[in-house]
Image (tube, rainbow, N blue to C red):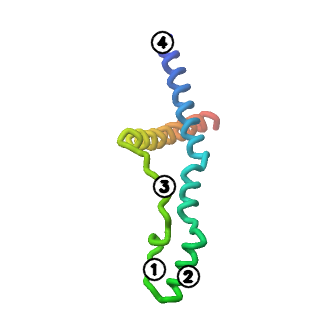
Amino acid sequence: MKHKKFIKYLAIFIVLIFLFSYFLETSGYYEYNLQNKKNLTDAQIEKFESDIKAGKDIDLNSYLESTTIDYSNSLTRTTSEANIRLNAYLKKFITGSFDILGKFIK
């Protein structure tokens, strides 16, 4: 009886972690930050074009404004790395489980 409860709670825990990770990925926060970093302002574009006309050496990083503030600390970096590893293991576990279940269906 204890094993059944343990397996039930473990399955619920795994599903909740998967759903949490999925929603974080689909929120698009990381992609939004990358898009903002890629976009240049009008003044930067004008400076870039004038430097091209003048024949100067061009480094794209000198035209980008760094507006991001890094609020991370050792705890957030550690938990983020743990989350990435856990997601990889869960993905392997879930795909393996579905592969096994697929063999039973055939």
Within the image, what quadrant is residue 97 found in?
Answer: top right
Q: Which mark is residue 58?
A: 1
CB atoms at circles 2 and 3 under 8 Å apart? no
Q: Nearer the viewer, mark 4 or mark 1?
A: 1
In whole angstroms, how far apart are the C-alphas of marks 1 and 3?
23 Å
Q: Earlier in the sequence, mark 1 or mark 3?
A: 1
Q: Which residue is mark 3?
A: 68
Element under label 3? loop
In whole angstroms, how far apart are the C-alphas of marks 4 and 1?
67 Å
Q: Could you tell me which quadrant the C terminus lies in? A: top right
| Relative side of 11 to 106, left or right | left
CB atoms at circles 2 and 4 under 8 Å apart? no
Element under label 2? helix
In whole angstroms, how far apart are the C-alphas of marks 2 and 3?
25 Å
Which amino acid type is marked by label 4? Lys
Residue 98: x and y, percent? 57, 37
Q: Residues within 10 Å of mark 1 (few under 14, many from 20)?
A: few
| Relative side of 105 to 1, left or right | right
Q: Which mark is residue 1?
A: none
Q: Which mark is residue 2?
A: 4
Q: Nearer the viewer, mark 3 or mark 4?
A: 3
Identified at 57% across, 68% down, the residue is 40
Residue 60: x and y, percent? 47, 73
Q: Which mark is residue 49?
A: 2
Q: Nearer the viewer, mark 2 or mark 1?
A: 2
Residue closest to the far left: 74
